[in-house]
Image (cartoon, coloured by chain):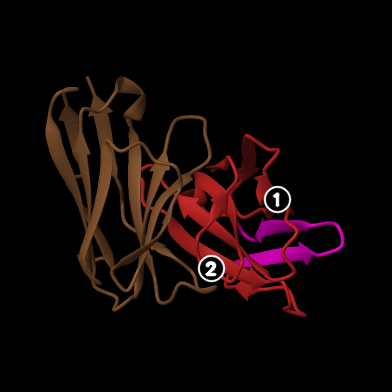
Amino acid sequence: ETGVTQTPRHLVMGMTNKKSLKCEQHLGHNAMYWYKQSAKKPLELMFVYSLEERVENNSVPSRFSPECPNSSHLFLHLHTLQPEDSALYLCASSQELENTEAFFGQGTRLTVV
Amino acid sequence: AQKITQTQPGMFVQEKEAVTLDCTYDTSDPSYGLFWYKQPSSGEMIFLIYQGSYDQQNATEGRYSLNFQKARKSANLVISASQLGDSAMYFCAMSSRGYSTLTFGKGTMLLVSP
């Protein structure tokens, strides 16, 4: 069992759909992150949670809505997405918010049609 | 603002040879961390090695070593004795402000041939 698990691995959705990405970490970490990886662009930080509180929101459109119900789970709720939102969405966790390595899940490959 | 630059879109190396992947960074923060991650085709980002800005010695982890030159703001990854399984995308990343949030470079695709 990997430390950080993301589901689903692949998702195709229409622009009017509502879907959610799920991330679960089994490492006892206190911080969790959502990153977006688009083709030919560096990974972009989207959201940061520390002890279930959101601490950073990098100007992400409101059609992306994160939720952290507890320190082990992180969701990314999606609605009325655009085709340019197609990307690999990576979840990560770290022991603390301060300088410790982050461990990533395998990502959800999202295609918006 | 932090910035990571990886100037090599792709690198080729033969099995068992050493390879250096370049990374330069820019930050005004006195305290920061430098990371290297490997991303195989499966998509998962695998942590390889970490160097703190105040660490006196270069970090090493098995076949991976980080050539940290603070004055030049470079943090190159050296992979010794390349293996076929090393073929992947490699990302250099930086954290600062004491946070574990990462700024990534664009990555370098490494291909290891028999």
Chain displayed in brown: A
> Is residue A54 in sight in this rendering?
yes
Relative image position of residue B3 (x, y in whole percent): 67, 47
Instruction: Left or right? Give the position of A113 relative to B21.
Output: left
> Is residue B42 in sight in this rendering?
no
Chain letter for the residue marked with disc 1 in the picture: B
Give the structural element (helix, strand or loop) at label 1.
loop
Please give the range of residues in magenta. B64-81
**Can you tell which quarter of the image residue A82 is in?**
top left
User: What residue is shown at x 25% (from left), y 72% (from top)?
Assistant: A71
- Shade of chain B as shown in the rendered figure: red
* Kind of residue sitting beneath label 1: Cys
Residue A74, labelled with which disc?
A: none
Q: Mark 2 = which residue? A: B99
Which of the two residues, A35 or B110, is positioned nearer the viewer here? A35
In the picture shown, does residue B101 fall above or below B22?
below
Q: Which mark's residue is nearer the viewer, 2 or 1?
A: 2
Please tell me whether residue A103 belongs to the stretch shown in magenta: no
Please tell me whether residue B70 belongs to the stretch shown in magenta: yes
Relative image position of residue A59 (x, y in whole percent): 44, 42
- Residue furthest right in the image: B71
User: What residue is shown at x 53% (from left), y 40% (from top)?
Assistant: A42
Marks 2/1: CA distance?
Answer: 20 Å
Instruction: Left or right? Give the position of B71 relative to A75.
Output: right
In the picture shown, does residue A104 fall above or below B55?
above
Q: Please identify the quadrant where the C terminus of chain B is shown.
A: top right
Chain letter for the residue marked with disc 2 in the picture: B
N-term-proximal mark, 2 vs 1: 1
Which of the two residues, B29 or B102, is positioned nearer the viewer here? B29
Relative image position of residue A14 (x, y in whole percent): 16, 23
What crowding class fits label 2: few (fewer than 14 Cα within 10 Å), some (14-19), or many (20 or more)? some
Residue B23, labelled with which disc?
A: 1
